Amino acid sequence: MNKIYGVILGAGEGTRMKSCLPKVLHKVAGKELISCVIDCLNSAVKMQKLVVVVGSGSDLVIKHLEKYKADHVFQKERLGSAHALLQAKNKFKNIDGQLIVMCGDTPLVQSKTIKDLLKFHNKNKNHATVLSGMVENPFGYGRIVRDAKGAVKCIVEEKSATEEEKRIKEINSGIYCFDLKVLWKALNKVDNKNNKKEYYLTDVIEILNKDGYKTDAVALTTEEEILGVNDRKQLAVAEQILRERKNNELMANGVTIVDPKTTYIDSDVVIGQDTIIKPNTIIEGKTKIGKNCIVGPDTTIMDSQIEESVFITYSYIEESEIEKGVKIGPFAHIRPKSVLKQNVKVGNFSEVKKSVVGQGSKVNHLSYIGDAIVGKDVNIGAGTITCNYDGKNKFQTVIQDDVFVGSNVNLVAPVNIGKKVLIAAGSTITDDVLPNKLTIARARQIVKVRKK
């Protein structure tokens, strides 16, 4: 079996994005454009090597590529797609096999399409195969020109096309499968005798044909799938398409999405069967949500792990772990590094930050729990706060099992509250409290005669 390699052309400046960020690092559905392409390739085939051609903002792109173990080469001068691919030649010295070439700004291509392209290439024993598409409006695309027998003659770019060629609706997607043993010689023959004075990768097809090699183009995809992203408007279109795909995938697998048009779920999110997602909900990053949950409306969850049978409404959750049976909201904020154990309740306008709240405990109203360890079956009264910050350092509060904290209590950290302690409403606690104590820390009520 032939070994498979990949090259992603990602050196474009993306001037139409009008951004300091390299184009391929802009995100759609929570994922960078180039990550969408890499994930597509990795899902489709087992690659021996992946090389990304980088250019503008290369430091940021190279750093991003580290997690993929992808190699890279520089294209210092922007002289066209053939010139870009040539920069990767030294990475494939004395290597035979097949090379899949993709662009770094095509996030909508699906892995099945790449599998089908490779299958077609091998079945027909081609030396080069172009992934094409049939579109109603081919303006701006390179046209696939075929001879009378239907064989591919060449690919003609928009600016070089005749009026007859411009009427062709089969277009080049910019995705290719090449046999490495013939590719580099053909690339070296590409010239820049065209309107843009660039070296077009599309010219390789005509060169290979003239040299007696077998080439073909196959329309395996839709116009939607091969859309590139060159500006913010196209970025928004790609975002919409990917989110619609994600919603459809989840609904097909048993998730109820009440209003898909107002529900925004990132590509890598995982949601369990029989979970209900209500309108105006945003679920981002690497979030995982278990079965039988109710999420929303008007809820945002980022990079969090949510177990089954959790209820979340009108709330904001970041980088936290939520165990089975937890109820959150309305209007709660769970900040990063928080862990809510089974059957915890965090209610109206309460906030939890970098804390562990034990099984069955309640933080129901207008409270702040920060840098704290809260035990099992603890009741936190309304308006209670952990005073964890002295303006310079953060300190920890420990509240052990079965503690009852009255309303409007201030727990000044560092402080440790023992098991089964009852803290009277309105108290400010600055010292540790031993187990089984009733603690009152407030001034005695004084009643005076009011002068008229």
Image (tube, rainbow, N blue to C red):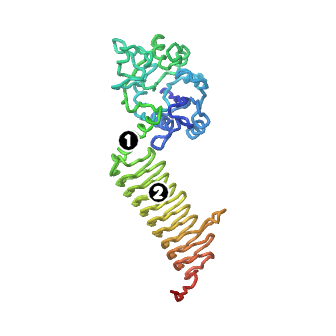
x and y, in percent, of residue 112 in the image:
40, 34
Q: Relative to residue 198, is residue 391 depicted above or below?
A: below
Examine the image and state in which quarter residue 399 appears.
Answer: bottom right
x and y, in percent, of residue 385 in the image:
54, 69
Q: Relative to residue 333, is residue 255 depicted above or below?
A: above
Q: How many residues crowd around disc 1 within 10 Å: few (fewer than 14), some, or many (20 or more)? A: some
Q: Which label is found at residue 399?
A: none
Q: Which amino acid does label 1 sit on?
A: Arg
Q: Distance between the residues labelled 2 and 1?
A: 24 Å
x and y, in percent, of residue 318 in the image:
50, 55
Q: Relative to residue 56, is residue 428 depicted above or below?
A: below
x and y, in percent, of residue 271 in the image:
40, 51
Q: How many residues crowd around disc 2 within 10 Å: few (fewer than 14), some, or many (20 or more)? A: many
Q: Which amino acid does label 2 sit on?
A: Tyr
Q: Relative to residue 70, is residue 296 depicted above or below?
A: below
Residue at (64, 66) in percent of width and height:
390
With 412 as the anchor, is 148 left or right in this view? left
Residue most toward the right? 392
In terms of sequence position, does the residue under pointer 2 or pointer 1 come before the other? 1
On the question of residue 92 being in view, the answer is: no
Q: Which of marks 2 and 1 is in front?
A: 2
Please tell me which residue lies in front, 82 or 298. Answer: 298
Q: Which label is found at residue 316?
A: 2
Q: Which label is found at residue 245?
A: 1
Element on which disc 2 rests = strand
Residue at (51, 28) in percent of width and height:
3
On the question of residue 300 being in view, the answer is: yes
Examine the image and state in which quarter residue 21 appears.
Answer: top right
